[in-house]
Image (cartoon, coloured by chain):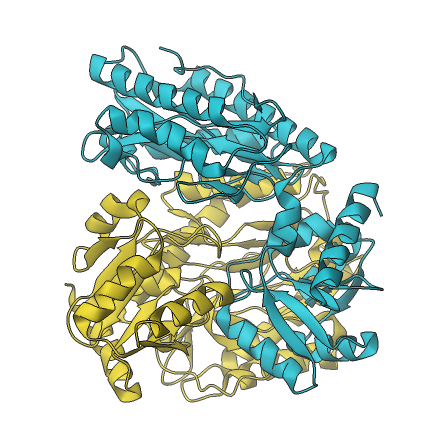
Chain colours: A cyan, B yellow
């Protein structure tokens, strides 16, 4: 087992011991990968690629179905792979019995309510208590270790190289969809595993939808284009947004870009180990509100990035979680004017003792 | 409201009335799209693009966050769009109060256990009962209406055109990843919304993993390659698998392909309105077992296809559900020999009163 993985399992087992659990059933993709190395993704909530069972002592186990048998053995060599053919419970119950488990936790956030009820009832029939727990592994994942930081840096670097390669090819008349597709092709061609989320290219009025789907709309000279893109490399995600213009930027858009950049800089300046997440959000939001655009910035200022492109901590107005050294978060304020246009600027930063380190080097249309 | 959508809502409301529910909270992507037209996809279980509330009378409502406000208004014009800014409950509770809802159902299969508990508790505090329900909308979706069948036919047709275009370009020396990427590019280039699942291209021993991820392995002349591909067009999915060989097929592989094809034909012959799903699975499995490969066919023989690429009904060995006219299912037996190779052949069929109609026309390497 790699030292990093050994450390993670040990930390998790300590957390289980503190709570009196004999084990944890891990259901979320990223938690599974973090602990075991098993890379398979779930096909939606309805179709799990497998679960881990981490007993306080012994194991650990990877429970999956026959489709993943070979991959599981290759990718998670430290786990004993158990194949279920007709339902998880048929294989989990004898395992719990063999291990002498009386009370275990399951990941309440990553099992459907229906599946959780089946689990709870199926275990109760054997005198075993399955109890909902949340965030046991996510809490470990919030603070990145050195191998994770290195992977994230590589992911951010490659994402910027892809963006630069795209900008060389970007021309008026391209549709949003063609542009998004070109970006994703460059990602794969340049070595990424996959995009970390569906690439957003949103021109003009479409930019006012923070999660716009690229359309057949052609991109014209002079209009702002929101490009939100990220990739997965070595399992780790990157996430970056730029708002660019082909040709001249009109004065109104220039003001909006400058405003959002001011908000972003203020938020970045607010990031520091020990600071509450909401203080970072407040720093960005105040500037946008003071400029009269309070109603045009609906989403949170940022989110954690790692194995998941959106993970803890969230930099929203309600979170009193204190940032810690080696957390990795995005800082991405925006201004969205319905029917007109949108601007969003997003960088990733690593929290340090004295502030933060901005991982992005790209400055395209950032400081006008 | 389109007549098809009106019919769906009416059928759902009858089901709610029969069960004494004052409404249904719809959480699943495909159920949401089926009822409302809202196209946004969720980013995993942790991040919903929104929910519908379908009261017995009045509404219906689409609850989402500000990122989707504009898209929701455009795509679901028959729904009243309500935006939640700080949690679903803040907007749901006053709505339930206004509507006089005392007891409603939520989709237990499409809410995480953690989210469901928050919902149940948050509503109980107002004297409202939120109860788990499953399959209310999925049951309606199992049988396709004419507009859906037309969309599925178009999706299957385009998928086969993409496959043919790929086969013209497919050459020895290509990596699995490059081949999968080429297929997905052709999909988009030829007009698909997106792939309906990550394309599988698995050569030689990789073919023995039914859900193999395309690797950097080069594909050589003479080895079997499992290609499992599908796309989304007009919201509806296609799903097809072929096992192809560049150059000459060796006698052993030829036997495996013939065996799987015999199993597929037997299963297709077994499909008919009124027949139990397990009978179709049994027809395929018996042939593979009799040939001594019972242990090499672990997955179900087929699954429904529609707005989701995997939906009800499942054609597995345990399902006694009776097939009905205008259900659309895949028939996809396989043989997987660890460390050696795999074969899977998959077509889609529409169940009819007298049997079924095979939607695929492609015959590449099907009848050797």
- Pick the quarter of the image with the N terminus of chain B: bottom left
Relative image position of residue A266 (x, y in whole percent): 42, 22
Picture quadrant of residue A178: top left
Picture quadrant of residue B355: bottom left
Relative image position of residue B356 (x, y in whole percent): 42, 77
B171 is higher (above) or lower (below) than B129: above
B263 is higher (above) or lower (below) than B1: below
- Total tally of numbered discs in the picture: 0
Relative image position of residue A305 (x, y in whole percent): 55, 38
Q: Is residue A82 visible?
A: yes
**Depth check: A251 or B14 in front?**
A251
Q: Is residue B150 visible?
A: no
A361 is higher (above) or lower (below) than B5: above
Picture quadrant of residue A292: top left
Q: Residue at x 59, y 41 (%)?
A: B179
Relative image position of residue A2 (x, y in whole percent): 83, 43
In this rendering, would A322 be left or right of B150?
right
**Depth check: B149 or B51 in front?**
B51
In this rendering, would A9 be left or right of B103?
right
B121 is higher (above) or lower (below) than B220: below
In this rendering, would A257 be left or right of B73?
right
- Pick the quarter of the image with the C terminus of chain B: bottom right
**Depth check: B100 or A172 in front?**
B100
Q: Residue at x 60, y 39 (%)?
A: A306
């Amino acid at each position: 087992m790699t030292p990093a993985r050994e450390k993670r399992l040990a930390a998790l087992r300590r957390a289980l011991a503190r709570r009196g659990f004999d084990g944890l059933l891990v259901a979320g993709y990223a938690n599974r990968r973090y602990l075991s190395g098993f890379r398979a993704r779930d096909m939606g909530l309805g179709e799990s690629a497998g679960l881990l069972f981490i007993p306080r002592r012994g194991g650990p186990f990877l429970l999956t179905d026959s489709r993943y048998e070979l991959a599981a053995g290759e990718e998670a060599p430290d786990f004993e792979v158990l194949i279920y053919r007709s339902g998880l419970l048929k294989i989990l119950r004898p395992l719990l019995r063999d291990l002498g488990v009386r009370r275990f936790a399951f990941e309440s956030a990553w099992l459907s309510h229906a599946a959780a009820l089946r689990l709870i009832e199926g275990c109760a029939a054997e005198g075993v208590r399955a109890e909902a727990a949340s965030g046991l592994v996510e809490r470990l994942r919030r603070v990145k270790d050195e191998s994770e930081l290195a992977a994230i840096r590589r992911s951010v670097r490659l994402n910027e190289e892809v963006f630069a390669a795209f900008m060389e090819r970007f021309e008026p008349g391209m549709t949003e969809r063609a542009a998004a597709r070109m970006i994703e092709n460059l990602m794969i061609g340049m070595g990424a595993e996959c995009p970390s989320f569906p690439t957003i290219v949103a021109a003009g009025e479409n930019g006012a939808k923070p999660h716009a789907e690229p359309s057949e709309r052609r991109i014209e000279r002079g209009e702002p284009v929101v490009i939100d893109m990220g990739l997965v490399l070595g399992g780790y995600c990157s996430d970056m947004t730029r708002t660019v213009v082909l040709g001249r930027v009109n004065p109104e858009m220039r003001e909006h870009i400058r405003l959002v950049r001011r908000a972003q800089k203020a938020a970045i300046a607010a990031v520091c180990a020990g600071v509450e997440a909401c203080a970072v959000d407040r720093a960005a939001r105040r500037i946008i509100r003071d400029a009269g655009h309070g109603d045009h910035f609906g989403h949170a200022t940022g989110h954690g990035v790692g194995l998941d492109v959106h993970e803890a901590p969230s930099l929203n107005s309600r979170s009193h979680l204190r940032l810690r050294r080696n957390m990795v978060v995005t800082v991405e304020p925006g201004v969205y004017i319905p029917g007109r246009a949108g601007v969003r600027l997003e960088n990733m930063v690593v929290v340090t003792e004295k502030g933060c380190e901005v991982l992005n080097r790209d400055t395209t249309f950032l400081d006008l």
